[in-house]
Structure formats: C-alpha cells, structure tokens
Image: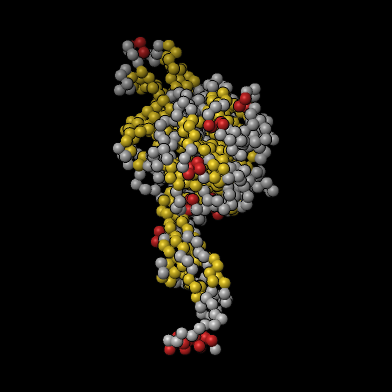
C-alpha cells in the first residue's frame, strides 16, 4: 500500500518519488486585518486537492490549541492577539501545505462594542443622534430606519449609566411607523426637555418630549410638508427671539422655512428665496461670519449658502468655491473650526447617489472660503454620505470621520495634525469595516471625557447591524459644557462656547457652536493643559459670559443669566423664561454684592425698582439663579 511505502522510505532514508501524489493547493489565503479592541476576527483558508482536509492554525509559528477548523475565529480581540497567523492544511494522503502569513494588528484607541442593544439588530438604519432626552446627564441614542417596502420604526436607546443601553419599546416614539431619514433635536417649547423632528419620506414628524421619558406626536404642526421628501430637517433660532425655528429641505421641490411663534405653533415663511429654493435634502445651520445670526448651508448638485441678513431675510451667496464647485450629488455639510482661528470651516461630503466622488474642505478666512485641494481628505473618491467633526484624542484639534455607503467600502477617519493638514488613519475597526454606513455621531456616552462613535448602517441597501466604538482614552485633558438658555432658546442652539488654554506651550482659543447635531454638548480636547484660562459663552441673545481659571476634566452646566435692561434710574426690566426664580443683587464696585430681593418671573418679563438707587453715585445689578 502507498502509505506503507512512504513510511518505509522515510525510515530507511530513501528518496522515493511520490508518483501521482501532490500537496494540496491553497486557493484562499487568510487575509491580514487591522481591528480595534473587542472586535471579532475571522481568518479563513481553503484548498484544493484530495479531501477531506485537516487544518491546524498557528500563531507566530506556534500551533494554537483546538484551532483545527477551516476558519479561525477570535472573539473579543485583545492586544495580545496581534501577530502572524498561518494555517497548515493536510489532505487525505497526509500531505500538507502552509498558507501565507496573515498579519493581525490591534488598535487600542477604541473598543468595538459587539453585544449591546444598539448593535444587536440588523435593519436599514439611516440616521443617528446622541441626545440626553431625559436630562439625567448621560447621552442616550436615537436611530432612524428606512425601509421602502414595509413599515418600519425608529429606535430610542436609554443610557443605563453603566455603559449599557435599554431599548425603549413603548410609547409613540418607539412604535410609530414610517420611512425615516434624519432627525433634529431641540427644545422647541422651552420646557427644558429636547423634542425631535424626523424627516420622513414623505413629510416630517414632530414628537414633543413630555419630560417623563415619554413623547407625544403633534399632528400637522408644519403646514405644507405632507409631500416633501426631506433627508434632514434642521432647527435653529434664525430670528433670535428665543424659540427654535425649522428649515425643511426638499429634494423634490421647494424647501420650507418655519418660524416658531412660541405658543406651540409654527408659521410657514413664504415670499423669500430661501423658502422657495430646491435643496438636495440636507441642510446645516452655523454662524460662519460671526455676526451672531445663524446662516444656512444646503446641499444639491450645486450647494447653497444663505447669509442671515438679521432682518428675517437671507441673502444667497453666489460666489466662491462653496457654491460653485459642482458634484453629481453633494450629500451633507459639517461645520467645525479645525484650525482654531475662531471661524467655522466647512466640510462637504459627496457621492450620495453611489457615485464615487471627492469631498471638499473649505477654510473660512473671514473674507470668504478657500478650497483645500491637497491631502487624502479631499482627493480620495468614494460614494460618501456624511461626516462628523470630533476631537477623539483630545489633543485640541478637531478630527473628521466620514462614512462610505458602498457595500464593500470602509469608512474614513482623518486625524488633525494641528498644522492645517490631516493624516488618514489606517488601523482599527473604524476604518476597516463596511456596512452601507449612513449615520455617524460622536458622543461621550460613558462620561469619561473622550468621544465615542456610533455609526448607523444599512440605510441604502440591506439590513445590517450598527457599529458602536467606545473610546479608551489617554492622558489628555478635556472639558464638556452644557448650556441652558433662559433668554435664548432653552437648548442654547447657536451658542458659541470658546475656551483658551495653553497646549504644548502655545496659547490658543478653541470654538464649538451648539447645534442639534452636537448632542447639545460642547466638547473640548485640552491635551496637556492644566488650566482653562478663559471659558467664554456667547449666547444667541447677545449675552456674553466669561469665566477664568477653570480646572479641566469637568462636565459643567452653565445657565444663561436673565437679561437686565435699565428703564430709568433704579428701575430694571428683567427678561427670562417663565417660572425662573432668581435673586437680584446690587454692587457699587463689582466686588461686593448685596441681595436686594428674590423674584419668580411668571410672565417672561418683570420690572424691579431699587429703593436705594438714589443713595449711590453708581450702582451695578445682577441676577443669581436660586
């Protein structure tokens, strides 16, 4: 028998030709991979030849115990798993072949969460937002879904404050059905709890937060939206009256602008270009010219930039690369001050119709925008869909995450080098996984001061599980700021938060503008800073607060002070939200303050007369919340 012949030949050292025998041929080699901590890794090898085959996997040339299947699966990957993996395939004749080496790198920046409510189910997910809807101090998660062929619902996950989430399964926000795109969160009725408007196909839906972890669906608050196909309504207080308004871009016709009347109803604004122009389905508000009034960027084949004229009207900007650079489809815009000069820059992602296109980065120079033309961030062509700015390593400079809607296309993370350039990150699961990714949102869900990342998948074609990456942090400092408006809208959308700190021996300011897409939180990376020399809040009302020598590594909430106006000597008009209780204090030197009275503002505006005003040559006043 041939096996006997081979054995004897081996014993006596004869070189006997093995006529008709051939080693198995490796037809599928295991592939090198780069993943994050916690990820699941699978190596597979296939061979042709005389079956059945036996398999033995090796790690750094040492046999792995019980690793004798066609695939080697590593779950909850650790740093110690990094290295070289090979497989020895043995056929029925005892002949073997060794695969090529597959290298595994494990990036420790993030941990991929593989078992949790937000990542357990596969759906056609579209948009996502971190939002603390119940005001318990921890970011919850809202995810929208799209399924044109059957009824579908959106998902709200409540943060359990221990790193896990519970899916909300009761109430209208969890059971209402309809094809959804993206959502915008903000406190439209100024009751202290964020509400949400969802872009549907067609129409928009408004869910008002009841403040007890439930919502009520408001019927038809926005007239004329029944047939609108909007991928992303966006809210802002464009007239700065203290109530959030709404812009609804329309891919199939005229866009819509609604002014919040402050009584639970909205007026549709007509008769001006911004409300009669067709947008590509998405829009984003930002005060790009720093005049205190929110401006609007809307996408399309040619993008639109509308400057707020501060009189209830908008001027369309028709010159400059932001509005003249063409694409088959601009998907979405994201605002962020990536060079820390105090001006919001703009990133526009392209390729929303599955066409491979290059993105655009526009640097705001106060005198206009300059298109950045070099670097992978603007030269790689893919079917991109959207982006999100966030300083994930807390080094003081905003980084950028960009999603890819191709089935086999990975997402992209660009690290800010701090000199106006970006480096493409190539290691870790964030940039080596694909899933028809659509939604993307940075948010610190575990309150450790480092931004985590959620990615919504499957929205364009197929039911796919979402991605959740927990940031493992480093030694860098940070600051998180929540703003509560009293004269401005309660969510403080439009507020600019600036911090000045010494980082790496250099003093500079950073800027964050509160928006519905920021989770209503301003997050700052501070690197090696040990002190925040100045923290400045520029409220939409025009009120400015500045605090000095603030220790880092804190999550602070700042409440806007009431607005004080002098009507006549010693008589003040005090404006704030209804029900706000405060103490009125007076001073003659801005150092020592004395209480005058306590008051509760029942109507929104009240008057107070200081009985001792005539006894002082000068008198200063302030209010302090009770």
Placement of 278 over or under 170, stated as above or below: above
Pinpoint residue 569: horizontal percent, then vertical percent: 40, 11
Q: In front: 41, or 129?
A: 41
Q: Residue at x 43, y 27 (%)?
A: 538
**Colour option used:** secondary structure
Assign the N terminus to one quadrant of the image.
bottom right
Q: Which residue occupies 41% across, 38% down?
A: 420
Residue 511, how many percent across, how many down? 42, 33
Examine the rendering and report whether any part of residue 589 can be seen.
Answer: yes
Query: Which of 494/358 is in front?
Result: 358
Pick whichever, 9 or 542, lies toward us. Answer: 9
Name the image quarter holding residue 254: top right
Q: Is residue 578 visible?
A: no
Residue at 45% over, 27% down: 366
Task: Give the left or right position of residue 340, taking residue 214 as reference.
Answer: left
Q: Nearer the viewer, residue 123 or 397?
A: 397
Tell whether 391 sits left or right of 151. Answer: left
Quadrant of the drawing holding the C terminus: top left
Q: Position of residue 475 (x, y in %)?
A: 34, 47
Which residue is at 51% across, 31% downward? 286
Residue 585, x across and y down, in percent: 37, 22
Left or right: 623, with 184 as reference point: left
């Amino acid at each position: 028998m041939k096996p006997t012949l081979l054995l004897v030949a081996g014993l006596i050292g004869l070189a006997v030709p093995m006529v008709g025998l051939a080693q198995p041929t490796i037809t599928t080699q295991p592939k090198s991979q780069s993943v994050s901590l916690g990820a699941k890794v699978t190596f597979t090898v296939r061979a042709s030849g005389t079956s059945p085959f036996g398999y033995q996997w090796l790690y750094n040339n040492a046999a792995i115990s019980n690793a004798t299947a066609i695939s080697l699966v590593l779950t909850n990957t650790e740093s110690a798993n990094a290295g070289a993996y090979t497989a020895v395939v043995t056929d029925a004749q005892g002949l073997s072949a060794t695969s090529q080496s597959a290298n595994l790198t494990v990036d420790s920046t993030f941990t991929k969460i593989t078992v949790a409510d937000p990542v357990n189910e596969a759906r056609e997910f579209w948009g996502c937002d971190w939002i603390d809807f119940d005001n318990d101090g921890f970011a919850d998660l809202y995810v929208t879904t799209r399924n044109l062929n059957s009824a579908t619902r959106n998902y709200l996950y409540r943060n359990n404050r221990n790193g896990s989430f519970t899916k909300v399964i009761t109430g209208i926000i969890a059971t209402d059905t309809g094809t959804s795109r993206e959502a915008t969160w903000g406190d439209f009725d100024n009751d202290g709890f964020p509400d949400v408007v969802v872009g549907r196909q067609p129409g928009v839906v408004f869910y008002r937060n009841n403040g007890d972890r439930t919502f009520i669906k408001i019927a038809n608050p926005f007239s004329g939206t029944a047939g609108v196909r909007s991928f992303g309504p966006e809210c802002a207080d464009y007239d700065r009256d203290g109530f959030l308004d709404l812009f609804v871009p329309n891919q199939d016709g005229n866009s819509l602008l609604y002014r919040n009347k402050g009584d639970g109803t909205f007026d549709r604004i007509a008769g001006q270009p911004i409300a009669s122009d067709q947008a590509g389905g998405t829009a984003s508000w930002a005060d790009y010219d720093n005049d205190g009034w929110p401006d609007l960027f809307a996408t399309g084949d040619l993008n639109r930039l509308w400057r707020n004229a501060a009189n209830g009207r908008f001027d369309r900007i028709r010159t400059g690369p932001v509005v003249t650079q063409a694409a088959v489809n601009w998907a979405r815009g994201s605002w962020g001050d990536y060079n820390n000069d105090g001006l919001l820059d703009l990133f526009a992602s392209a390729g929303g119709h599955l066409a491979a296109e290059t993105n655009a980065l526009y640097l705001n120079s106060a005198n206009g925008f300059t298109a950045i033309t070099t670097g992978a961030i603007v030269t790689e062509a893919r079917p991109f869909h959207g982006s999100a700015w966030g300083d994930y390593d807390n080094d003081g400079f905003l980084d950028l995450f960009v999603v890819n809607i191709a089935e086999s296309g990975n997402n992209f993370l660009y690290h800010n080098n701090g000199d106006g350039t970006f480096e493409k990150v190539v290691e870790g699961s964030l940039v080596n996984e694909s899933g028809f990714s659509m939604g993307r949102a940075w948010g610190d869900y575990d309150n450790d001061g480092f931004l985590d990342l959620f990615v919504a998948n499957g929205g364009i074609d197929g039911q796919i599980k979402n991605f959740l990456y927990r940031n493992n942090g480093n030694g860098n400092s940070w600051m998180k700021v929540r703003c509560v408006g009293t004269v401005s809208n309660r969510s403080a959308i439009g507020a600019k938060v600036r911090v000045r700190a010494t980082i790496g021996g250099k003093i500079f300011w950073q800027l964050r503008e509160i928006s519905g897409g920021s989770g209503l939180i301003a997050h700052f990376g501070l690197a090696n800073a040990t002190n925040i020399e100045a923290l400045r809040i520029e409220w939409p009302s025009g009120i400015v607060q500045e605090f000095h020598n603030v220790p880092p590594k804190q999550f602070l909430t700042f409440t806007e002070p009431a607005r004080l106006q002098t009507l006549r000597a010693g008589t003040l008009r005090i404006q704030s939200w209804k029900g706000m209780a405060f103490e009125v204090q007076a001073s003659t030197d801005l150092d020592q303050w004395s209480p005058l009275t306590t008051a509760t503002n029942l109507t929104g505006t009240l008057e107070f007369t200081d009985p001792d005003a005539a006894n002082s040559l000068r008198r200063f006043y302030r209010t302090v919340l009770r």
